[in-house]
Amino acid sequence: MQVKSILLAGGALLAASSGAQASGFQVGLTGQKNVAMGGTGTGLYLDQASQFYNPGAFAFAPTGFQVGGNMAIPRISFRPDAADQGQRNLQNTNVFPFSGFIGFGPKEGKWRLGAGVYTPFGSEVHYQPGWEGRYALTDINLRSVFVQATAAYAITPQVSVGAGLVMLAMGSVDLQRDIPLQAQGSTTPAHAQLTGNADHKLGYNAGILFKPSEKLSLGISYRSAIDAHVGSGDITLTNLPASARSNFSATSFDVTLPLPDVYSVGLGIRPNDKLTLAFDANLVGWSRYQSLDFTYAGGVLGGAATSSSKREYQDALAFRVGAQYKITDNFTVRAGTFYDMSCVRDGFVTPETPDADRLGLTAGFTYAFGQRFGLDASFLFEDFMKRSQTQDDLISNGTTDRVAGTYKTTISVPGVGLYMKF
């Protein structure tokens, strides 16, 4: 480990290793109906969550209000690269993404206005005390909340457009790692904790929906990138040997994490009044995340006022398929699947984002209580492919600020929501 990287270089802001249904550290759990259909939603309109998936489709969506939440239950294990080390299981912690949307407009009219709140990034991960990667990461706890205002208009009965103004309204991070220094007579290493709140940032999304017939719809949407920035975050050091304190004068940090833009295309097919099929493809612009760079107010060991950790993410594709079938007027079932390609290159996997190609299976249902009220439920199981990197990989890539070994992750995500139609 390089001296200048001892304190912070391996950290992450607003990042998550338990991101469900999207590569890297996204959390794609917006809208229970969409989640149950494999995360599709670009080429059709199910409800007010169209504001997130394709604002153009929102022009045809029913008016109303919906709110829902999920419980992400990750299971992450790590096996060190060294022989006979056995498997380490994380102290897995459940997290609770949520979303809510409201949509207004004339019932048979051409326009819609809406607002939404959702949590596209955020998680909590705790590694066991003393694990091999403790100098890269021991704990990460983050929160982010985005809000969106949306307007959509149906230019003709076949074509609609829409756009939304998106704001990172709340973001916080608590990032911790051990420092390879230990006071004489102590059994506990020095420890660093970084806490801070992200600045408010604006972005946007936009989309188009084309309906050549009542049985077919096609959509295109774009969600912009946002740079999440924490300025004047706090650094707290504990168990630091007295002899080393003068080398850690930094008390605050400044860091920016580039969040990716997303290009989506989708197709909706309705062979009959009961069956709907959906297909989506997403291209996520992760390549803008090449390094994680910290600036300190003061110095860390060696007097460095900055540090940099390589990420070198690559753009990633995801392919999604979903279906819903209306069994009765009150009961609709859904299912889906997706294959999501990792944005993290071999030899660049970090403890805060042990990313890998992943396969997801989804299911869910809606039960309507009369004409205006109903309950949505979803379930997602996500299986990450086993991901390994050796010490030689890390040395070759200049990424020895992280640990060699094999990660394996699965995530189970039940969810529930309520809706009301106006």
Image: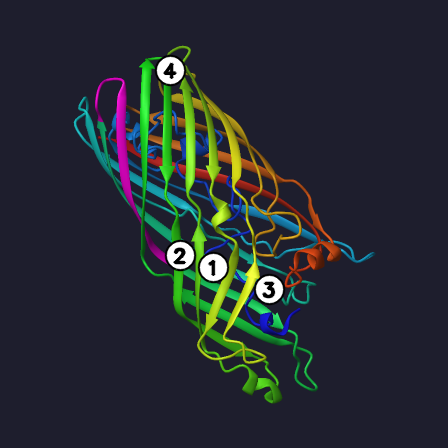
The residue at which mark 1 appears reads as 13
Q: Amino acid at mark 2?
A: Ala
Q: Earlier in the sequence, mark 2 or mark 3?
A: 3
Q: State the image coordinates of residue 153 (x, y, percent, origin top left).
A: 22, 28
Q: Nearer the viewer, residue 254 or 85?
A: 254
Residue 137 quadrant: bottom right
Q: State the image coordinates of residue 117 (x, y, percent, origin top left).
A: 32, 45
Q: Are marks 2 and 1 in contact (CB under 8 Å)?
A: yes
Cα–Cα gap, marks 1 and 3: 14 Å
Task: Name the residue: 52% across, 34% down.
Answer: 318
Q: Earlier in the sequence, mark 4 or mark 2?
A: 4
Q: Which residues are magenta?
A: 154-171
Q: Tell me the mark number nearer the camera, choosing from 2 and 3.
A: 2
Cα–Cα gap, marks 2 and 1: 8 Å
Image position of 8 with respect to 27: above or below: below
Residue 53 in view, yes or no: no
Q: Nearer the viewer, residue 105 or 387?
A: 387
